Image: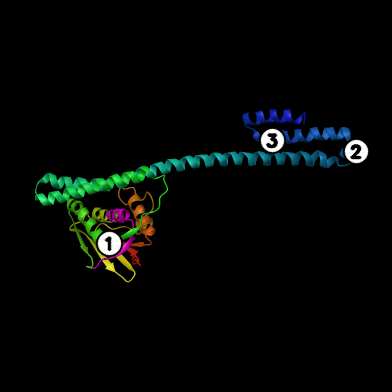
Amino acid sequence: MIFTFPLSVLLSFLYHRSKHKLWIIFIAGISFSVLPLLVLYITKPDYIMNYFVFNILAMPVHNSLGIWLLVTLFNKSVSDKELYLRYIQNEKAEAVNHVAASLAHEVRNPLTTVLGFLQLIKSGTFPPEKTERFLEISMEEIRRTEQILSEYLSISKPHLPFQQRIELTAQIKSVVELMTSYANMSNVTLSTDSPQSNLYISGSPAELKQLLVNFIKNAIEACKDVDNGMVNITVYEETDQVAVEIKDNGIGMTPEQLSRLGSIYYSTKMSGTGLGLTFSYQAIRAMNGSVSVRSSPRSGTVFLITLPRAKLNP
């Protein structure tokens, strides 16, 4: 130990500064074999002579391979740890980018609605009662923007999802009224077809409204570049479920686009982030619902959202 420890320090110094690392490992294996064999020859010469070939050949090779294996595993452990630390840093950066992009997307929708109503109010072509209604909707959207910002500010705090009974037909009518100005700005006709009876589901009213806005907004934008663009929202009543069909005659999607739809950061729009549909899909799953889509290029798109009915209170 007196000789081998200082030698190992020297070899370590040479190993980190040499380009011929395998030679340093080979020298270490020979050195760490010669010193013990020399001490053993002085104390037990008969043992060395009886197993001369083994001690001269096998021991140096054995030590060299052992040192090489030890150094290789140690280097791999260090590189794995560095890779893991870089992965953690990239995950943190990606999380920050995700939150920033998601926040921008969620805030853009109500601001777009407010801008549309302000432009209508500025035109001065509507009666006072209509203008007052536009102002009420704009104020509601500003309050929704404030709620979105509050939710993002408290994103690190654990909270239970807010669930309550929601009358679906009234909620859809509210969203359609909200998006009508945006549809008019895009020269798209927006229509609804829903049953007269009340249809109740369980979920978060804010999330339901947001996902409906996302689907309808995407449908309107898909019809911007077609003649006589139309978006129709139809509500189907079933025994224990309700289905909401959002159909447009827009540009449609290819099979490859359909397969990636709902994936985070994937969007068919040049300026889109893909977070709107990602949020919508997650919100639908949180309400124990499902969503399917049919589309083909230049033939429009049909989204079918299926949600379970709310259980009656005992």
Label 2: state its secondary structure: helix
Residue bearing mark 3: 25
Residue bearing mark 1: 168
Task: State which quarter of the image contains the C terminus.
Answer: bottom left
Where residue 181 appears, x then y in whole percent?
A: 18, 52
The local crowd at label 2, few if under 14, some if 14 to 19, many if 20 or more residues have their Cα within 10 Å, is few
Question: Looking at the image, is mark 3 or mark 1 earlier in the sequence?
Answer: 3
Q: Amino acid at mark 1?
A: Leu
Q: Amino acid at mark 3?
A: Ile
Please, is residue 47 above or below residue 204 in the view? above
Q: Are marks 2 and 1 in contact (CB under 8 Å)?
A: no
Question: Looking at the image, is mark 2 or mark 1 earlier in the sequence?
Answer: 2
Q: Is residue 299 visible?
A: no
Please, is residue 236 above or below residue 155 in the view? below
Magenta span contains residue 313: no
**Marks 3 and 1: which is nearer the front?**
1
Q: Which residues are magenta?
A: 197-213
Residue bearing mark 2: 46
